[in-house]
Image (tube, helix red, strand yellow):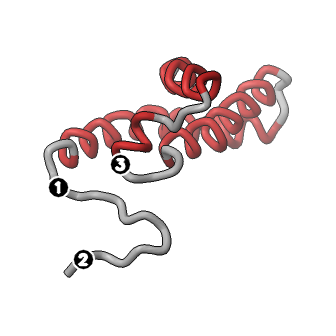
Amino acid sequence: MFFVVWLSEIIPSALAGEQLESARMAGLTTNPVYVVDLGFLLPVMVITGILLLRRHSTGFLLTPGMLIFGAVFPPQRASMTCTFSGSTMRAIPYGQEAAS
């Protein structure tokens, strides 16, 4: 489900030729959460599901890990969001040094 939420921000920004709002606010060129979710988690979960439906042994091997990860990761990410949303942490753009 998360990919629908991510794509709802990515597609309009891409069509408008603008930087993602969430990445711009963080001082980044792209949102690393989107990269991890859309570039790794979603493909692994889809492949695991297909393998499981085909009753392939690798599907049975990967499924418990994906189920546990799917149950643990969202609350962890939500707690990080709540923890850091009010902080003054800012990303330092590549090539720049932190102010002392």
Report how far apart the C-alphas of labels 1 and 3 lie in the structure: 11 Å
Rendering coords of residue 22 (x, y %): 40, 37
> In the rendered structure, which disc, 2 or 3, sits on the residue that comes first in sequence?
3
Rendering coords of residue 37 (x, y %): 56, 38
> In the rendered structure, which disc, 2 or 1, sits on the residue that comes first in sequence?
1
Whether tag 1 and tag 3 are in contact, CB under 8 A, the answer is no
Secondary structure state at the residue bearing disc 1: loop
Residue at far front of view: 17
Examine the image and state in which quarter residue 11 appears: top right
Rendering coords of residue 67 (x, y %): 53, 33
Whether tag 2 and tag 3 are in contact, CB under 8 A, the answer is no
Q: Which mark is residue 26?
A: 3
Q: Residue at x 48, y 38 (%)?
A: 68
The amino acid type, in three-letter code, at marker 2 is Ala
The amino acid type, in three-letter code, at marker 3 is Ala
Q: Residue at x 80, y 30 (%)?
A: 51
Give above or below for 14 relative to 36.
above
Q: Residue at x 64, y 22 (%)?
A: 15
The amino acid type, in three-letter code, at marker 1 is Thr
Report how far apart the C-alphas of labels 2 and 1 lie in the structure: 14 Å
Q: Residue at x 64, y 33 (%)?
A: 42
Density class for disc 2 (Cα within 10 Å; few <14, some 14-19, many ≥20) is: few
Rendering coords of residue 62 (x, y %): 67, 41
Secondary structure state at the residue bearing disc 2: loop
Report how far apart the C-alphas of labels 2 and 3 lie in the structure: 16 Å
Density class for disc 1 (Cα within 10 Å; few <14, some 14-19, many ≥20) is: few
- For label 1, the residue is 88
- For label 2, the residue is 99
Q: Quarter holding the C terminus?
A: bottom left
Secondary structure state at the residue bearing disc 3: helix
Examine the image and state in which quarter residue 47 appears: top right
Kindly report which numbered mark, 2 or 1, lies closer to the viewer in this rendering.
2
